[in-house]
Amino acid sequence: MSLFSLTTVGETLRIAAPYACAAVAGVWAERAGVVQIGLEAILLSSAFASVVGTLASGSAVVGVCAGIIMGVCLSAAHATLVHRTRIDAVVCGIAWNLLAYSGTRLGLRALYDSASNSPSIAAFRIGPTGNEGWQVLARVLCDPLSWLAFTAVVASPYVLNRTRLGLRIRAVGENPTAARAAGIDVGRTRLLALCISGAIGSLGGIHLAFDQHRFEAGMSAGRGFIALAAVVLSGWLPGRAALACVAFAFLEALQFVLQDIGQASKAITLAQMLPYAAVLVALGLGVGRRSAPGGLGRHAEN
Amino acid sequence: MFGAPQRGTLMRLVHATVAAVVLALSTLALPASAPPPPVHGALSHIRVGLVFDVGGRGDKSFNDAAFEGIDRARRELGIVMEMLEPSGAEDREAALRLFAARGFDLVVGVGFIFSADINVVARDFPSAKFACVDYAPPRDGNIPQNLRGLSFREEEGSFLVGVVAGSQTSSRQVGFVGGMDIPLIHRFELGYRAGVLAVCPDCRVHVTYAGTTPDAFRDPARGEAIATSQISAGADILYHAAGMTGHGVFEAAHDLGAKAIGVDSDQYDEMPGTVLTSMVKRVDVAVYDAISSTAQGAFRAGMTSFGVADGGIGYVSEGPHALGILAETRVKVAEFAGRIESGAVRVPSVK
């Protein structure tokens, strides 16, 4: 694979999809003022639910719906716990991540008697088979989940910035006390924002699972945390967060090519750290020197 | 004003930590015990405790093979067995210690990850016997007197599947996808490369590692990306030593019309038609061997290495799962296996 080819484009988009969905989900939650570090949990649990749904019903569409419902439920539960019982959102997020990791493994064992993976699903093997660049790209573009993810990512900046709902969400995120004084129901608005966040994040998890045509324990492999970095890097802007993820995915695809080229030299280690180093450099250069939403992690005060 | 909420957060953190620790310990308190086995004649009635690697039973690979070994010992030797599956790094040593403290005759750790922990526990319980699969001896070479390290010459099996790949590639390019970039996995790479080059000196071997952390063994999406990259570059047969990450290699090989070679156990069922063969590591043989020698009072400390010669390492060469292997390839591999057994071919294992 040369560095810049249709294969690279296709692979970049495919790798980017789960990151981008998780990052945009993070933006939705945090712009509403709710700290959300449980993105990993959303990816993992929705990946699991989508596979269970597909295997149980025999329909990929039902599976996708199950995955989205799982993401929405988890995210809504997070909003409720944080808002109603005032549990610290960071602690709560850590708990979700632990719960999702162990819960999906428990589910795997209970449902499929395996510690590592579910049976395979046949879902969405669309597009031409072959190793030409256009075939790789075509498979990515033919995937309905790519389209769902793309739509969610592209619609997010518009909804957040140009609609009444977006304005309300940003208001409760910037200053919950003032928003409540203006007559906005802070709890309900945050709940709604987190439901949207959960739905978008779940698309990333479903993409991961359907891409492998099965669920594997821990298959999100830290993507939720990279997405979190993208949220901060973007300055809490959904479009930029998605772009940061595409850039990261490109570096990851590039990393594999460079590793292969630089075989048998120390360059391998350098290539492996490329995507992560780039994130650090970008953060250091202050790409995201926009400040966090003013009401992030704060509740409306009496 | 400012102190109260902070203290509240702190207390919640403390509570959460306590809860997590209690949960972690409670998982240890539930050993998977088996009913007492029938006693076979004069065979000794030793107690064997086995601690699984991360993944545990049902991984259709490493841990399941270890279970087969201990289960065979239960059936044939009438040993008493108990098993534990640690939930994380902190529990590994505790699980080993638990068995040793309860006076088990033999405690087995499954996986190289136990190497450091088992050294410590073995020194603390000199009267118990220990065995560790894929054991990596400490740098000073000081292995405890009651510990038997079981290792495999994976490079030999990798060499054999390398011969398969080198013989059957039509593009004269093959690939290797490694999991975590560590010496243990380098052995697979080196053996494979040597095998490929033995039959196809001008073949190119693409090599890519998934990462430098244990996550590299459970990231199938990344495995798919690596395999796609290698196949696009021209490789048509890919061998992986990457745990669950390898499933992504099978996915990519299937979609891009290439072939793949499985690892550790027969992985044909992962992607029928795409998996050409698998390098097979008989963890069950090693575990059974350690138990039976202990049962016969012939426990031997130090390293024991399994390879092609003793049947501890091999590849899937027969039956419906090896239909993709040409007859002439099979002959070639058998020839090399013979040369490895006789010592005529030495497979490299260190970079």
Image (cartoon, coloured by chain):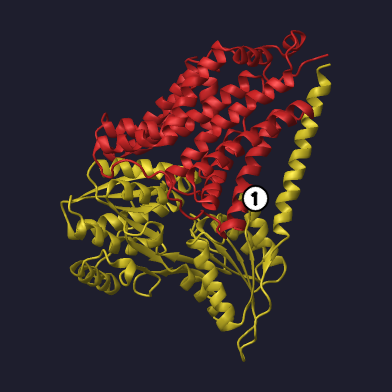
Residue B206: image x %, image y %? 27, 46
Instruction: Tell me the residue at 32%/72% (across/down).
Output: B319
Please give the residue where the numbered disc 1 appears in the rendered image: B90
Q: B98 or A131, which is in the foreground?
A: A131
Please give the letter of the chain rendered in yellow. B
Q: Is residue A179 visible?
A: yes
B37 and B160: which one is in front?
A: B37
From the viewer's perspective, is residue A257 above or below residue B257? above
| Depth order, front residue of B116/B215 | B215
Q: Colour of chain A?
A: red
Characterize the local packing of mark 1: few (<14), some (14-19) or many (20 or more) Cα atoms within 10 angstroms.
few
User: Disc 1: which chain?
Assistant: B
Q: How many marks?
A: 1
> Is residue A209 shown left or right of residue B116?
left
Q: Position of residue B223 (x, y in %)?
A: 39, 45
Judged from the image, the secondary structure of the residue bearing numbered disc 1 is helix
Residue at 75% of width from left, 34% of height from top? B13
- Residue A251: name its quadrant: top left
Please identify the quadrant where the N terminus of chain A is shown. Answer: top left
x and y percentages locating residue A191 in the rendered image = 68, 25
**Relative to A42, residue B184 above or below:** below
Depth check: give the residue in front, A119 or B262.
Answer: A119
Q: Amino acid at mark 1?
A: Glu
- Tell me residue A149's x, y (percent): 46, 30
